[in-house]
Amino acid sequence: ETGVTQSPTHLIKTRGQQVTLRCSSQSGHNTVSWYQQALGQGPQFIFQYYREEENGRGNFPPRFSGLQFPNYSSELNVNALELDDSALYLCASKPGDNTEAFFGQGTRLTVV
Amino acid sequence: EDQVTQSPEALRLQEGESSSLNCSYTVSGLRGLFWYRQDPGKGPEFLFTLYSAGEEKEKERLKATLTKKESFLHITAPKPEDSATYLCAVQAGYALNFGKGTSLLVTP
């Protein structure tokens, strides 16, 4: 059984550009959520997808958007990148609502 | 607003020196409290879920407990490989609300 995998592992972008991060959920998991973790902080909830629909969103602007596909994999898109978007982006999947979430290894995004 | 506060921010222990990490929380309608371990540059690794006050769970040298206002992660006779950041999170709605973590260093 494979766990949650994210790609790429590292990325450097220029301010104002757009970026797409990808996540393959763990087998059997239909719920995927994305988190942003700044250095020295705990992860912050961006949004969650359940069966291809966004069903929860944190305090992030609309330039953060996402998709979930029929195989439950997911993308996080960020437009008009800002320097403060530099962080570790984490994807987590879970098989149900009140269950533990399993995280991928993250994508380290640096905006210069 | 949900709040999660972890203490201490950093903890240095000698190998074999037992201690406890604290997670205080305020949340409306707790659906679960979660403990994760995070190594530098990696994603959080799931450790425990606790659902109701009085619940306890154990795994190797770790034991997690839950009251109505806080959770403790007890580390018994730690080893250097237990060095990591330990994160606590509460779930009320869809999101996990994380604390900032406790950075644990265990020296030989």
Image (cartoon, coloured by chain):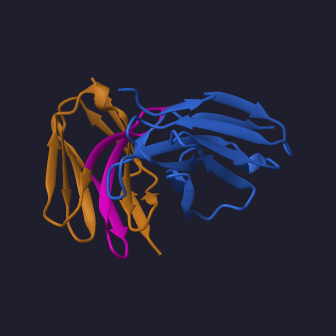
Indicate whether A14 appears above or below B28. above
Residue for point 48% across, 35% down: A104
Residue for point 22% across, 29% down: B15
Q: Nearer the viewer, residue B2 or A101?
A: A101
Give how far across and how far down residue B34 sits, in percent. Answer: 32, 53
- In the current view of this chain or complex, which residue is farthest to the front? A70
Residue for point 21% across, 33% down: B78
Residue for point 75% across, 31% down: A12
Residue B45 is a magenta residue: yes
Residue A15 visible in the shown view: yes
Q: Write down the quadrant of residue B36 in the picture.
A: top left
Which residues fall within the magenta stretch? Answer: B21-48
Give the chain ID for the blue colour: A
Q: Nearer the viewer, residue A99 or B84?
A: A99
Give how far across and how far down residue A29 sits, in percent. Answer: 40, 43
Assign the C terminus of chain A to one quadrant of the image: top right
Give how far across and how far down residue B24 sits, in percent. Answer: 33, 64
Q: Nearer the viewer, residue B57 or B70?
A: B57
Q: Nearer the viewer, residue A108 or B76?
A: A108
Compared across the picture, whether B20 is left or right of B86 comes to: left
Give how far across and how far down residue A102 sits, in percent. Answer: 39, 41
Compared across the picture, whether B53 is left or right of A4 comes to: left
Colour applied to chain B: orange
Indicate whether B104 appears above or below B25. above
